[in-house]
Image (cartoon, rainbow, N blue to C red):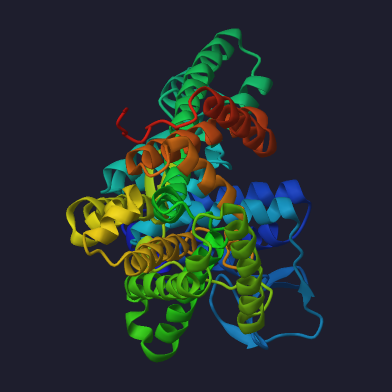
Amino acid sequence: MLRLLRCIALTFAAAHVHALTADEAKSIASGEGATRIEALRASVAHADENTVRFIQALSDDNVKLVDGKALIARGDRAVDPVSGSESAMPASAEDVTNNNRMRGEIESALAALQLLSPDEALRRAAVKTLQGNLDEAKLPLIDKALSLEPVADIRDSLALLQAAALLSSSDRNKRIHAANLLAQSSQAATKTLLLERLRDESDAQVKSVLQRSLSQVESRLAWGDRLGAIFSGISLASILLLVALGLAITYGLMGVINMAHGELMMIGAYATYVVQGVFQKFFPGAFDWYLLASVPVAFMASALVGAALERSVIRFLYGRPLETLLATWGISLMLMQLVRTLFGAQNVGVENPRWMSGGVQLMGNLSLPYNRLVIVGFACAVLLGVWFLIERTRLGLFVRGVTQNRPIAACMGVNTARVDTYAFALGSGIAGLAGCALSQVGNVGPDLGQGYIVDSFMVVVLGGVGQLAGTVYAALGLGVLNKFLEGWTGAVLAKIAVLVFIIIFIQKRPQGIFAMKGREI
């Protein structure tokens, strides 16, 4: 706030500025709501340092009335907003009450003043705040900010603000010019503004221009919604891919129906939570890098649990799918209860590092969050790693050999029991990586895995058992299809429609998108 005051003082130092008067301060702080709003709007056009300080005090509920005079409360002292002199706060001081409409106007006034802030982030935030609350009284300040703004995209946004403010002008030509300028906008607030102005406009020519501009803005917003749905689908697909990659090994390659796969993912998420706590307590200065340390920890935690599960239970149930399903379902319940005992039944909070906060603003209604972008990239990296491990390493060769023909692989000297353990641990570790990624976009709790286990099985089956390429295509297709259907039918009906589609597809093509290559005899 001090930086903002200094900036405004320097900006208007060379200009003739009508300083705040006692009568203006009183008009802003007392009287009818419409009168106060009119006085507040008028004060913004010629704001000096005292005006900014007074408006900020109003926002903080630190303005009191004493015998019809507005004073700023600072502890038990009263500060004159005009002269800055201090005195003891009289006992008869009355609080100034601001209703919701007045608070909105105060917020809008402060945002207008922040257009002159030296902080780029504050100026961007001010532009966003003003998009939904503009009037012609703020034009002088917007004009001043536009003439001083060094950043090109903020300058463009200020030009649109200028046009939006001119929509309320009494000059017909100015309203037409403003409507033509606003046709270039891709902001949802501009659509609302044009609709409101169209409802109140009486001039037929202006209404025609407003309608044309509204159609162009709506078309641009529709494209933003479509691109947003595609990105949301890709984001969901990346999560489904991470979850399904582990199943592509344990179920697709090994034939094990592991109903505890979701809980292995949950272990990865809780491992991330534990690493976060360690960094918060012992390495607070390096907290932004805790996620990088969480990746190997989440992988190893889930891999070790998976290896223990395979050695103690799964190894005795190969070739018996029903018993495997029941056993792993029971283990999933045990793991959930263990987590509830250790961490409690409530969700735990996992924070995004600062470098994953925010996003890329492509259009007015299209923003790509950094955390989602990172997860998409992470899923691609994990996919490449799994492909290289399965197709280009000795372990991958053994896994494929044991999968295709276990007796022959054993005759060739392959320790099939060890390969089973390694493969199951790998699939479990990948589930842990999925949990690590999910902790950055959703809640972490004992039931985390339950929401993804069915979807991940559908991805593996639809893509083709044992086919990594099929898993990728299935995850991408289901993710994008699900998000598009959600926009038309809602989340529940979208899930049902996707399930019906998969059932029909599997009926027509039981081997999935990519069938296992075989040899006819």
Q: Residue at x 37, y 74 (%)?
A: 300
- Front-most of 490 and 49? 490
Q: Residue at x 27, y 47 (%)?
A: 151
Q: Is residue 52 visible?
A: yes
Q: Where does residue 439 sit, x and y in percent of width and height?
A: 49, 64
- Front-most of 236 and 86? 236
Q: Where does residue 423 sit, x and y in percent of width and height?
A: 36, 62
**Is the residue 185 above or below the residue 58 in the image?**
above
Left or right: 326 as drawn, with respect to 114: right
Left or right: 358 as drawn, with respect to 131: left
Q: Where does residue 446 sit, x and y in percent of width and height?
A: 63, 69
The C terminus lies in quadrant: top left
- Front-most of 253 and 142? 253
Q: Is residue 7 visible?
A: no
Report how many numbered discs are placed on residues in the image.
0
Q: Which residue of the protein is positioned furthest toward the right in this rendering?
A: 92
Q: Where does residue 129 sit, x and y in percent of width and height?
A: 52, 49
Left or right: 95 as drawn, with respect to 230: right
**Is the residue 8 above or below the residue 140 in the image?**
below
- Front-most of 84 and 342? 342
Left or right: 197 as drawn, with respect to 35: left
Q: Residue at x 67, y 58 (%)?
A: 28
**Is the residue 417 above or below the residue 403 in the image?**
below
